[in-house]
Image (cartoon, rainbow, N blue to C red):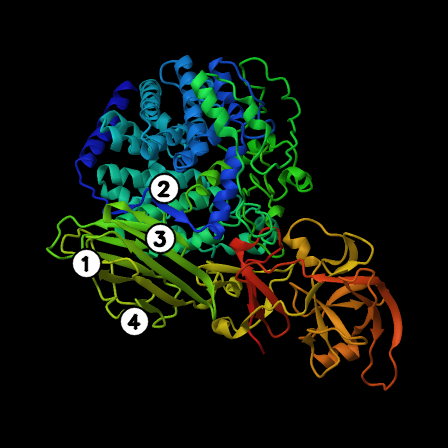
Amino acid sequence: MRKSVLINLSVFLVSVISGAAESFSQDISPFPPHDVRLDATSLGARAMALNKDYMLSLNVDSLLLTFRRNAGLPTPGDPFAGSWEDPACEVRGQFMGHYLSATARLQDDADIASRSTFIIAGLKKAQDKLGGGYLSAFPTEHFDRLQNLQPVWAPYYVIHKVMAGLLDHHTFAHNQVALQMVVDMAAYFGKRVDDTLQINGTDHWHEMLNNEFGGMSEVLHNLYKVTQDKAHLRLAGLFVKPSFYEPLVALQDPLPGLHANTHLAQVNGFAAQYEATGDKDALTAVEHFFNVITHHHSYATGGSNDGEFWGPADQVADAISQQQHALDTEETCTQYNMLKVARYLFSWTGNGTYADYYERAIMNGLLGTQRMPAFDLENKVLENQHEQHQHLAAAQETGVDSMLQLGSKTGNDMSVSRRHLQGTDDLSGGVDAALSPLDAYSANWRQAAFAQFTGLGAGQLQEEPENAPGPGVVLYLLPLGAGQSKGQSSHGWGTPLHSFWCCYGSSVESFAKLQDSIYFYRLYQAKQPGGPVADLYINQLVSSSLTWPEQGLTINQTATLHGPNNTALTKISFMAETGTDMIVVQLRIPSWVAEGASQVRLNGQTWRECHQHQSAASNLGSPVGTALSAGSYCSIKGVFKTGDVITAKLPMIMRAETVQDNRPQFQSLKAVMAGPMLLAGLTDDSRKITANASNLASHVSEVSTEGLVSLRLQGSPDIYLQQLGTQVMAGPLQQGNAAAMAATFRMLDISASEARPLTQMSDGQQLVLESMHRPGHVIMQDSQGQLSLQLTQNLQIDHLRSHGLAMQLSLSNAADANETTVRLQMMRVNAMQDQAPAKMSIVGDDWVVETYKGRYPEGSKALHGQDRSYIISPLGNIVDEKYTAYFDFQMPL
């Protein structure tokens, strides 16, 4: 056995050392996080502010509690009971790693910087107390169980997170203490892995790699790039799983049946391996993986997986068409990792395909996974009123370890109730609570562990104030079925203190770096006299600013994807110091642009030189800039000065993308796309539409707010006329835009030859009330006399009069002079008889007409079919509204 181990290790080490001799040059680089700022009014800035508010609300002693407890140190603070950070949960500590990665990128915020310094100092004390370089929130016994192939959750997965967070603090904050902590951890685990190989052999080690180990390969390869210590490179290579890596190198598809996020983290390891060693096999593995997953396993959102696993290639439709499956689609963590894969690939190639994917994935699969407060609440960025940095500074000066007082107030004064997992109130002692047996290598081990450490079920949590819209309420899974809301996923919306799923950590990190892939640069290795010295890549149409001190430039971009006539617009303004050099602005012309319709101007003049441009010094395999066409870059060369402006007009293709499924019965299942955005239908159930999908633009129109009102019962402060599914009733207005839309109707005047939105009220007008978000559905009375929403035939006036019920408007005197009050009477209108309509019933007493409560999510449009219409909205702008991601298109007869 020992001889076999030595032979296998020697072969592996030869491969590692030879790979390290290869050269790798990363021509294209991102800007430091603090050099890019999002415009404060943008959706991204609101998302980052909400995320920062959550980060600052968390008690630092509670974050450190399980690490201190494992080291036998005093443990001030309350445990995050019932969550994945519960002291009895086996993956406790994983959130800390992502939290560190997030704070590392936000060091320009004094509150964040002080807090992260305190946390790293606390972790260092725990590591010193544990000894030998070991640092974790759980004992080494977890690794003993893993070595013995006994049930254990995912210990190396957690270690990766902690190491990555500390290494990020060296990368972004130049923290040498954090770097040494990672080096010490690598030494401890290097010895542990070597002991395992010596005792159990290589085959046994590979079997251990069937337990989720996160991005251990990635963080160790990244550590090697810093230290150039071959021991780190060797250990990184040992965390390459041959059964996954080798099929990718051989251009096969090993994905079916694999747990998605387990293996996505490994792909990022292959990427780091290529950057550290220049190993072309690693490059092949990453490129091939990206091609396989995006062409054969993905949804139109850019996401993938069903129930956290990948299914057969080109058979994605089952996960969408089966409602229960559709609640478990697209784990948020997987989107986090796919964004990293795409970013790696772009930095190596400059290929706009990867920037296109990044845009699609972040807009549809990340933005909108926070339960953001409704935009109509003053539509302002949340203002953080934090005094905690003062306590942090005082604690650092005095050496105080306890910071319990920091958790008493959250960033926006949200009220958070604390729940404790039954049986874990007693946290005394240093041994884990007894765990029910879990098969660590079965298909459902993760789900079983999730159920064990969740406490209350998702259905129970939905009515808890803890997960109301606000900081720290995010998704685990993004549903893609019909008539489902994000909160209806099997895990529901999380809670700020009692969830801490894996997706909480990846979300906190993701929303801390929304600005990091808008701009990139490439410095020319050899400069020609009078020629350009660098390329500036503008990859994303996001309102933001860039400071480029090395080139003496400040760039301000104002952009929107919601311009008139389905057109994206951007304006890029320059401020320059004197004596700046020539650069080439590489402006991405996305693949979703209508071919030949783009317009790029410099200082008002059409730029006609978007032709191919490549410096002779470039070592990229192909030109970066190409002709002005969809899926390319427009190269704009010049010595930019203050006042220079680049503008671009990019008309979007409105299109229907067929689901990635090669079975004939699913070819009608299509996602409606406007540029990079998936436009989901705001509907409770149906996904059928009779329309020509190949001519989608002719079926889409802009939405209007004309005639929209909300009706409040006079004398009551909160009783509104509302719809619940197809039922119509009066009741208190609930929180969120979904409830506000349910209490918003369009008054349609049917006294003329066609139904028109009511613009001016007069006594005796005949009207119908149409649902705000279900076009063509009006309030009718069924055979039992109950009010309900019923679909009409495209609001044809004859149909309304001959088959339906209409309302007669009766203006009444309001008690308040500032109110307009109406009385709605149900009237049967029969166009065939020349007689006064008979009064049927009264909807209610007097109703106060108020400004409409509901808001169409930004970018909403109307999709018209032969038999019905839908409101369609960008998925990333939907919060609590029910939606349908894919439509079933039927050709008109």
Element under disc 2: helix
- Looking at this rendering, what residue extends furthest in the left direction? 529
Element under disc 3: helix
Assign the N terminus to one quadrant of the image: top left
Disc 3 and disc 2 in contact, CB within 8 angstroms:
no
Q: Residue at x 42, y 13 (%)?
A: 129
In this rendering, is residue 413 above or below 69?
below
In x, y percent, where is residue 265? 39, 39
Assign the C terminus to one quadrant of the image: bottom right
Determine the CA span between mark 4 and mark 3.
36 Å
Which one is in front in this view, the residue at disc 1 or the one at disc 2? Answer: 2
Q: Callout 3: few (<14), some (14-19), or many (20+) C-alpha neighbours within 10 Å?
A: few
Determine the CA span between mark 2 and mark 4.
33 Å
Element under disc 1: loop
**Circle 3: residue type:** Asn
Q: Is residue 258 visible?
A: no
Closer to the camera in the image, 150 or 882: 882
Provide the residue designation for mark 1: 614
Which one is in front in this view, the residue at disc 1 or the one at disc 4? Answer: 4
Provide the residue designation for mark 4: 606
Provide the residue designation for mark 2: 34
Provide the residue designation for mark 3: 291
